[in-house]
Amino acid sequence: MENKKLWLGPVFLFGLIAVGYLDAQADSSLNGTWVDEIGIETTYNNGDFQVFIPSINSYGGRGTYRTNNGNITQITTHIHGDGLSYILEEFILAELIPPSTFSFNKKWYSKEEIQTELTRHGYTETLDLFLMFFSEITVSYNVAGNLLVITLDGVKNTARRKQEMF
């Protein structure tokens, strides 16, 4: 169970970065910025979302989502270059990929742009490690006032609504 909890953060961070259709429904109770247990901020706004990671002072990803009967379905549409560079460094430290001086630019990347950049820099054998963040994912969720609970395979991740300062 603990292994699932460790992966829930990255999945929540990038995998939950959204899926959308033109006729998608979005639960307005999700609107606002939510801060999870490890400090990751996810902002939902009427079917669009964006993730910010304060610990690395960078955006993670963005996209769209739809909700239905207590489930939220999302797919990654873009990941920010700072977030991608962070992932690249983590994969190198974990010895999942060989060392490199390559890093991504400070811009939003689509799946196709990531594939192009990684291929150009010789990471063709590890594309799947990066592209997994673009997988569609459906999780259950519940909003109770200022608390959001996301459940994936029985593992709960809680987030609190961020109070906006004016």
Image: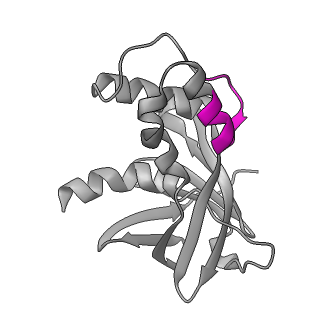
Left of 105 or right of it: where is 86?
left
Image quadrant of residue 80? top right
Q: Is any part of residue 145 visible from this angle?
A: no
Across and down, in percent, residue 76 comes to 60, 54
Image quadrant of residue 18? bottom right
Left of 62 or right of it: where is 99?
left
The residue at the point 72 percent across, 68 percent down is: 47
Is residue 106 found inside the magenta-colored segment of the image? Answer: yes
Q: In this view, which residue lies farthest toward the right?
A: 22
Q: Is any part of residue 34 visible from this angle?
A: yes
Is residue 11 found inside the magenta-colored segment of the image? Answer: no
Q: In this view, which residue lies farthest toward the left?
A: 1
User: Is 10 placed above or below 109 here?
Assistant: below
Across and down, in percent, residue 151 comes to 39, 72
User: Is 110 placed above or below 63 here?
Assistant: above
Q: In this view, which residue lies farthest toward the bottom?
A: 69
Q: Nearer the viewer, residue 145 or 28?
A: 28
Which stretch appears magenta? 104-116
Q: How many marks?
A: 0
The residue at the point 58 percent across, 55 percent down is: 42
Q: In the picture, which quadrant includes the N terminus?
A: bottom left
Left of 50 or right of it: where is 53?
left
Q: Nearer the viewer, residue 49 or 145?
A: 49
Across and down, in percent, residue 102 comes to 53, 15
The residue at the point 63 percent across, 72 percent down is: 30
Across and down, in percent, residue 122 comes to 50, 20
